[in-house]
Each structure stands twice: as structure tokens, then as C-alpha cells.
Image: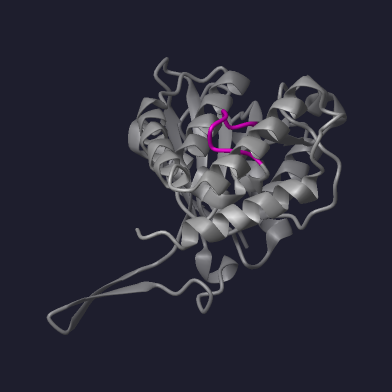
Amino acid sequence: MSLYELHERPALDAPILVMTLEGWIDAGAGGANAAAHLLETLSPTVLATFDTDLLLDYRARRPVMHIEDGVSTNLAWTDIRLLAAKDAAGKDLLLLVGAEPDHAWRAFSGEVVQLAGEFGARMVVGLGAYPAAAPHTRPVKLACTAATAELARAMPFVRGSLDVPAGIHAAIEREAGESGIPAIGLWAQVPHYAAAMPYPAASAALVDGLGRLTGLALDAAGLHQEAIEASGRLDALVAESDEHQELVRQLEAHTDTEDEAPDESPLEMQSGDEIAAEFERFLRDQDG
């Protein structure tokens, strides 16, 4: 039994499949707001919908009931959709949006990659964000995960070696790589202390990075303007405390040293974590 219903089968020219499924780590809503921006600016059409009765646990993702004057008028259900769009230059792309499945990951990943293959996808790219010991006063760095060592080495993004719990993007990435479709995950590094609030600089970096990686013509101007405004609000909070200005300066020095000599950082990661944790507590205590 198929997990999706196909509504249209347009002829697409080597599209990029962009994944922005929500449910796993997404610091500062970097991936979610990048997806929202793409949906708003690209005006995509629905190609396929997935069977959320089979894929989602509704007790964890309950539908929203709309009540008007005591009358239940609608239930808004979480969905998972495959969309088609064109960039500013007319290039095709696919967008996989909605909730991360709670069940049947292997079957879901297989069917997503099968659909990608049927539409001739030339690459699969996932978008996300995670907390990092980084200051908001420096450009957002992008890290990458890739299905092959060759692809990872070819990417101009931060690479690391570690074991972490995986999200559905990782399962699709692996499935795509095994099927011969290049697959990569782009991850924005968000300051620890801003991870619980919208951080538009991360979303802007993801959209820009997606464009650089794939050659898609994508406009992130709106996100960059939001990032400037958010940075100004953070600057105002930091300016209220000499102590926390110094903490930000330490994070800046840590980041700048990593850029100059990645293997000779003056602050170990735990030190950056401690600074960020203290700063996050400070921000939580502020009015507004």
C-alpha cells in the first residue's frame, strides 16, 4: 500500500528536492522559517500528499479545533506534502514540507526517494539548525552532512565527526545516496542564547546556502531584513550588562580563532557552552 496520493505529474527538468520536515532539532526555527519563506515567495503547487493517518501520532500532533461562538467549525490537521515550484530563473525544485513522521520511517524514506527519482531529481537537500557556541554578532556558519565522503569534501561548509540522534532527513539522505541521488543536509549554527526564539539570520543563511549549493535563484532579502532587526534587539539586551558584553566578546574571540585556526581554538567547546547557558538565562530574565 502506497503512503502517498499523487495529484499531478508535471514534466520537471532535473529539480532539486528540498526537505524541511518539522519535528527534530531546529534551533531558532531556522529551517521552519526558511521553508515558510520559500513557500511564500515561490507559490508552489501540490504534487502529492502523504497518508498522515499511517505516519503520524495524533496524540503528539493533535489537530487544531476552530471554535466560533461555541460552534466547532473546523479541524486543522497536520499534513505532509510534496510541492513543485520554480525559482526566479525558472529552474524546477521540489519541496517536501510538513511534519516529521512518527512511524514507518524506512517505508516513507523509500517512497520519498522513489518520487524524487520519478521526477528526475538531481539532488536532495535538507535544511535545519542547531545551537552552537557562537555570537549573534558574527555571520551564521553552515555545517553539512552528506551521503558520501566525496560530496562532503566538495562542500564549502563546516564538517565534523560525532554520533547524534537522527531525524527523518538523515534517513532520506541515506536512502537517496544509496539510490544514486546526491544528498546533503545544510545546518545553520544558531547562538545558544537565541535558540529558543526565532533567529531569522539562520533562515537567511540556509536560503543563501541552498542557492550557492544548487544554483537556484532564491531571494532571501526579507529574511536578511528580519535578521538585522533581530540583531538590533539582541544588541540592546546585551548593552544592558557589562558582564554579558564581555561574554559575547569571548564568544566572538572563540569564533574568530576557529576561523583562523580551526584546530587551535583558545576556548574548549564546554567553555562556550557555559558562556551561552549563562547568557541564555540572562535573556530569559529580561522583560519582553
Q: Give the side of residue 117 with respect to residue 34, left or right.
A: right
- From which residue to which does the magenta span run? 134-141
**Which residue: 64% across, 56% down?**
277
Q: Give the side of residue 227 with respect to residue 252, left or right.
A: left
Dominant secondary structure (helix, strand or loop) of the stretch shown in magenta: loop
> Which quarter of the image is occupied by the N terminus?
bottom right
Residue 159, image x and y in percent? 79, 33
Question: In this view of the protein, which residue sits in the foreground, 7 or 284?
Answer: 284
**Which residue: 38% across, 42% down?**
233
**Which residue: 67% across, 54% down?**
168
Residue 99, image x and y in percent? 52, 58
Residue 39, image x and y in percent? 39, 39
Residue 162 in view of the camera: yes
- Vertical comparison of 154 with 129: above or below: above
- Vertical comparison of 75 with 189: above or below: below
Question: In this view of the protein, which residue sits in the foreground, 112 or 144?
Answer: 144
- In the picture, residue 176 is in which quadrant? top right
Question: In this view of the protein, which residue sits in the foreground, 162 or 41?
Answer: 162
